[in-house]
Amino acid sequence: MNTMTYRGYIARVEYDNEDRIFVSHLAGIRDIVGFHGTSVNELESAFQEAVDH
């Protein structure tokens, strides 16, 4: 499993072969925050938006 980091937050990244998208959730927080993207750049933008929001 791969991870991404942004502003001290960590996200676990998986690839969904069926839907052909990257799926991710923030790790180490009490809420469930998920996001996805069809490319690494799209996933990274969604991650940053989720953290900033």
Image (spheres, rainbow, N blue to C red):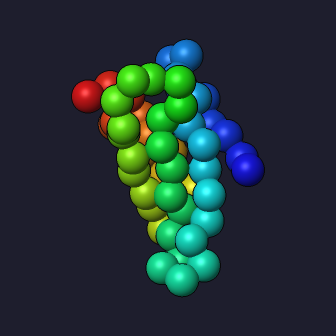
Task: Looking at the picture, tell me which residue is in the foreground, 36 or 30.
Answer: 30
> In this view, which residue lies farthest toward the left?
53
Q: Relative to 30, is 25 on the left or the right?
A: right
> In this view, which residue lies farthest toward the top?
8
Quarter of the picture containing the C terminus is top left
Residue at x-position 73% and y-position 50%: 1
Question: In the rendered view, would you say 25 is above or below 41?
Answer: above
The percent coordinates of residue 5 (x first, y second) are 60, 29
Question: In the rendered view, would you say 24 is above or below 31?
Answer: below
Asked if residue 13 can be seen in this view, the reply is yes
The percent coordinates of residue 51 (x first, y second) are 38, 28
> In this view, which residue lies farthest toward the bottom?
18
The percent coordinates of residue 13 (x first, y second) are 61, 50
Question: In the rendered view, would you say 31 is above or below 37?
Answer: above
Task: Looking at the picture, tell me which residue is in the foreground, 41 or 28.
Answer: 28
Residue at x-position 62% and y-position 37%: 4
The answer to which image quadrant residue 47 occupies is top left
The answer to which image quadrant residue 16 occupies is bottom right
Q: Relative to 28, is 45 on the left or the right?
A: left
Residue at x-position 54% and y-position 62%: 22
Q: Relative to 52, is 40 on the left or the right?
A: right
The percent coordinates of residue 44 (x first, y second) are 50, 45
